[in-house]
Amino acid sequence: MEKLGTANFPGALGAEYEFVAFPLEWEPDSIGAVYAFTGRDPSTSPATHEILYVGVAEDINERLSGHEKLKCVMPLGCNCICIHPENSEQARLHKEKDLIAKHNPPCNRQVIS
């Protein structure tokens, strides 16, 4: 399945990360990555994305299969998965934290009872 395009997401610390956007039906290769479930609006040029959830995976193919956050992101208009390949676990975790701090995605928020 072909990519939809690219998206650059800034982090809280000033870095900007380039992601490749794919439809949700995309079947990824087995790579390490930071990923974001987004609501993509293709009516703008370039398309804009609302980040709904950010996560990391050592193997993105394995991680996305039956992802537990789909129940959260789908009602919010998720129609895209954005991938930022990253082999280093330490770098993935740093980038995930940086992006969550900047965007405060609704499906990354902890429910405190």
Image (tube, rainbow, N blue to C red):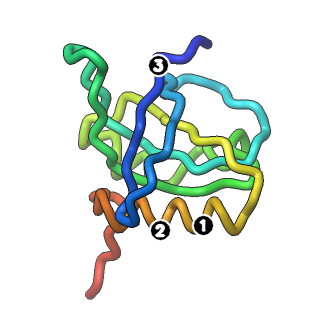
Could you say where residue 113 lies in the image, as x and y percent from the top left? Answer: 26, 87
Q: What is the C-alpha distance between the residues marked 2 and 1? A: 6 Å
Could you say where residue 11 lies in the image, as x and y percent from the top left? Answer: 39, 57
- The residue at 51%/61% (across/down) is 96
90 relative position to 54: left or right: right
- Does dot 3 land on a helix, a strand or a loop? strand
Residue positioned most to the left:
43
- The residue at 66%/42% (across/down) is 85
Q: Is residue 108 visible?
A: no
Q: What is the C-alpha distance between the residues marked 2 and 3? A: 24 Å
Mark number, residue 93: 1
Query: In the rendered picture of this protein, how many numbered marks are placed on residues?
Result: 3
Q: What is the C-alpha distance between the residues marked 1 and 3? A: 24 Å
- Amino acid type of the residue that numbered disc 1 sits on in the rendered structure: Leu
Classify 10 Å Cα crowding around label 2: few (below 14), some (14-19), many (20 and above). Answer: some
- The residue at 47%/68% (across/down) is 97
- Amino acid type of the residue that numbered disc 2 sits on in the rendered structure: Lys
110 relative position to 41: left or right: right
What residue would you read off at disc 2?
A: 97
Determine whether label 1 and label 3 are within 8 Å by CB. no
- The residue at 58%/44% (across/down) is 66
Could you say where residue 41 lies in the image, as x and y percent from the top left? Answer: 25, 24
